[in-house]
Image (cartoon, helix red, strand yellow):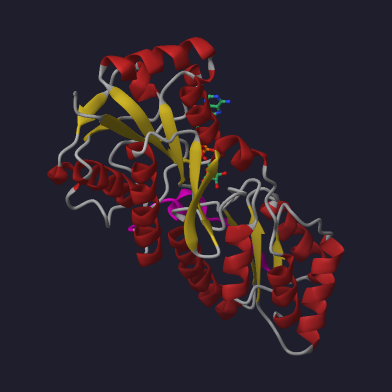
Amino acid sequence: MAQKAIAVLTSGGDAPGMNAAVRAVVRSGINSKMKVFGVYRGFNGLLNKEIEEMTLRSVSEIIGNGGTMLYTARSEEFKKKEAQLRAADFCRSKGISGVVVIGGDGSFQGARALTEAGINCIGVPGTIDNDIACSEYTVGFDTAMNTALEMVDRIRDTAQSHDRCSIVEVMGRRCGDIALQTGIATGATAILVPEIEYNTDDIINRIVKTQKTGKKHFIIVVAEGVGKVNDLAKEIEDKLHIEARATILGHVQRGGSPTLRDRVVASQMGYKAVQLLANDIGNRVVAMRNGKIIDLDITEALSMKRVFDEELYQIAKTISI
Ligand code: ADP
Ligand code: F6P
């Protein structure tokens, strides 16, 4: 019987820890006597036949590296049925019966489509946003939060020296988790997230209230999905007559060496994905629930709605005064 073969790809925005997940897939797969192919540049690699058989040593020295050694892409072409069938044919031509897809929920839709085309796929949550409803944790989140934390701490030094208000935009288009965690950890006076409506007067009132207790510098952490940080800075300057500066942290949050947590969770999730494929199980997403690694159906995973941690948000509001 021919040796079983699987493949691994990274898709969508890169996230620190993706390399650790790739390493876990390659090493667990080889340990289970399977061939493991690395697919370059997301789903595009299956369309452009950009794959390479991996060895144990192909993934040496990558566990601590940010980015993804397999590169990543957003493939519009792969959204078409014709492309998905072509990718599945290519997998079959190489004897590949399963693919581990490391990415966000867009990538999981691609994984489901490829499974429907006949190749078992397993999704592994890899995105800094922590915006995958079925999993309480996504690989990359811890590193991104800690980078944002360090950056906001630095911004606080200068805000404090000038008695200014600093407004810092962190990543997260649809999810305020990076903003919430960073905001609470840096003692931000206000945290703005896409999940909760805000009005500028409330923020102004909070600043005035704390000014009366002697506070002279302020940090406001804003999620990317809320945006408009320059407008907010201008409004604060106009209404409060204090200097305000806006900083957009941007892609600095996506890079850097993954934290211990990201390396460990990525290793656990990559291992779990291979166990499923080794048992010919596909169309599943690996997730974390109550700290344990579980798997669930992709369609079920994609239909779940994310729950924002309003309790933590309220704690932040109560104590940052
Ligand atoms: P993320 O995985 O981080 O959410 P995207 O939403 O950009 O990122 O999706 C990554 C890639 O997944 C897309 O560029 C595309 O190749 C694939 N993809 C997304 N949605 C679909 C879909 N409905 N069908 C097939 N492939 C999809
Ligand atoms: O999903 C991760 C993320 O970094 C989001 O926080 C951000 O909105 C988006 O990707 C930016 O994507 P890019 O700059 O790669 O288009």
- The residue depicted at 70 percent of the width and 51 percent of the height is 226
Q: Quadrant of the N terminus?
A: top left
Highlighted range, magenta: 243-257
Q: Nearer the viewer, residue 181 or 304?
A: 304
User: How far from the left and from the top, in percent, is residue 197?
Assistant: 81, 56
- In the rendered image, the vertical position of residue 178 relative to residue 57, given as above or below: below
Q: Nearer the viewer, residue 79 or 67?
A: 79
User: How far from the left and from the top, in percent, is residue 136?
Assistant: 57, 58
- In the rendered image, the vertical position of residue 139 relative to residue 111, given as above or below: below
- In the rendered image, the vertical position of residue 140 relative to residue 314, given as above or below: above
Q: Quadrant of the C terminus?
A: bottom right
Figure disc tally: 0
Query: Would residue 184 be found to the left or right of residue 38 on screen?
Result: right
- The residue depicted at 31 percent of the width and 32 percent of the height is 7
Check if residue 249 falls in the magenta segment.
Answer: yes
User: How far from the left and from the top, in percent, is residue 165?
Assistant: 66, 70
- The residue depicted at 71 percent of the width and 76 percent of the height is 315
Check if residue 196 falls in the magenta segment.
Answer: no
**Residue 151 visible at all:** yes
- The residue depicted at 36 percent of the width and 38 percent of the height is 279
Q: Residue furthest bottom?
A: 213
Query: Would residue 61 be found to the left or right of residue 143 on screen?
Result: left
Residue 200 appears in which quarter of the rendering? bottom right
Residue 219 appears in which quarter of the rendering? bottom right
User: How far from the left and from the top, in percent, is residue 176?
Assistant: 65, 56
